[in-house]
Amino acid sequence: MKKTLLLSVVASAVVMAGGDISPVEPAVEAPVVEETASNWDFNGQAVIYYQTTDKGAADLFDKGSSAAAAGLQLKAVNDDVAYGIGAGVEVSGISDLYLFPEVVGGFQQTANNQILASGDIINSDLTADSGAEITQGYLTYAVDNTSFKLGRQALPKALSPFAFSESWNVFKNTFDAALAVNTDIEDTTLVYAFVKAANNSLNLGTFAELNGSDGVHMLTAQNKSIDGLTLTGTYYYIAAQNGGDDSNLFWADAKYALGEYDIAVQGGYMDMETGSTTTSDNTIAAGLKVSSDFDMFKASLAYSYVNEGEANVANFGGIKTPLYTQMIANQTVIQNDAQYVKVAASTELYDGNVGLAYGMRVAADNTNTDKTNPFELDATYSTKVFDESTTLFAGYVLSAKDLDADKSNIVRVWGRYNF
């Protein structure tokens, strides 16, 4: 068993979790680090990111409705520093390139721990500043078929669907966690994680405890015994705070390749004690996706259902969901009280990938919510240049609360150079 088992399991899990051909932004993968004998491997990325929206009173490209960031991330990994103990460290720096406050109204993502992200990427109090953060810093060790990873790290959605690192922004959010991965059982991966704290996909500089000193415990089992079938089950335990009740979260995912079609089914039950005064119902969620490759283009059809429950189906350390119907900006619509349908297609064109997706909430449990059906249309283009070292992305989002409501627009562009 190589000491790099944990890293390879995590990398393969991220690749497996991708599988979505809808026109969301391409997954941001760190360059693969080849195993070496007691040597440090260095890699990194440089990013320029810009987004503007006309939601509200501001127009597209106005200073007040635009955000930007330029980021530089450096990473060093050594699988055997001494006595079989490996280590990794990652430093992420973010600047506005002096665009703030004259050209843009805030940072798209910040690494300054004095800025508290409250869900709005536009920093309205005009206190944005450049900053840097140690976004990963961990130790690794392997014993037979069990690997351990302790410290600040990225977590993959395939094995941790409610505490995962999101790739849509400048850099991925990360977690303070202890991770153990075991592969003793043939075709089976067992994972335990204790997640203590997390930053946020909008703010890398501030780590907050997820559940006080008790943290969050996660168990995941993934099995690939049957050819073409991947089964994943996950359980989260959240100990009660201040004399309340414990919370329990169950999530399952099945993916099967049936001839020319890929079929995926997901579902979950969240007995989450959030202290909400609006509803006391446990959250129930389910989803289905069918996708295929039709020669010149790929296409998929997805459906998700989330009841009007007390907890949202959303990432603990970010803003996205694990639902198949996740698009560029529809997470607040699909994470609670929504039946949602998404259709997507993509094709290779102009030396890149062109994608188009349309999604709409078709029903809701709440009678008032059910009167409106928000929709979203995503159009994207991505390409790789300079010997595929650099990814360029452009995306456009059109959305509204209903078909007849006023429309809002989002334009997002970024470039990412891996070295």
Image: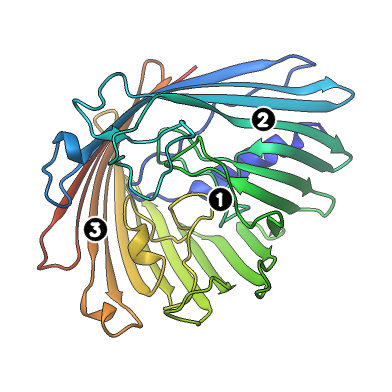
375 over 24 or under it: above or below: below
Look at 14% across and 35% down and name the residue there: 61
Please, what secondary structure does the residue beneath circle 1 have? loop
406 over 385 or under it: above or below: below
Q: Residue furthest bottom?
A: 367
Please, what secondary structure does the residue beneath circle 2 have? strand
At label 2, the amino acid type is: Gly
Label 2: how many Cα within 10 Å (few below 14, some 14–19, many 20+): some
Look at 51% across and 55% down and name the residue there: 315
Q: Nearer the viewer, residue 76 or 152?
A: 152
Q: Nearer the viewer, residue 306 or 8?
A: 306
**Image-based side of 326 in relation to 132, left or right:** left
At label 3, the amino acid type is: Glu
* Mark 2 lies on residue: 137
* Mark 3 lies on residue: 376
At label 1, the amino acid type is: Lys
User: Going from the N terminus, do you reach mark 1 or mark 3 first?
Assistant: 1
Q: How is the protein colored in the picture?
A: rainbow
Q: Position of residue 93 (x, y in %)?
A: 47, 23
User: Going from the N terminus, do you reach mark 2 or mark 1 first?
Assistant: 2
3D distance between C-alphas at marks 2 and 1: 20 Å
Q: Nearer the viewer, residue 11 or 200?
A: 200
**Image-based side of 416 in relation to 84, left or right:** left
Look at 80% across and 53% down and name the residue there: 186
* Mark 1 lies on residue: 157
Please, what secondary structure does the residue beneath circle 3 have? strand
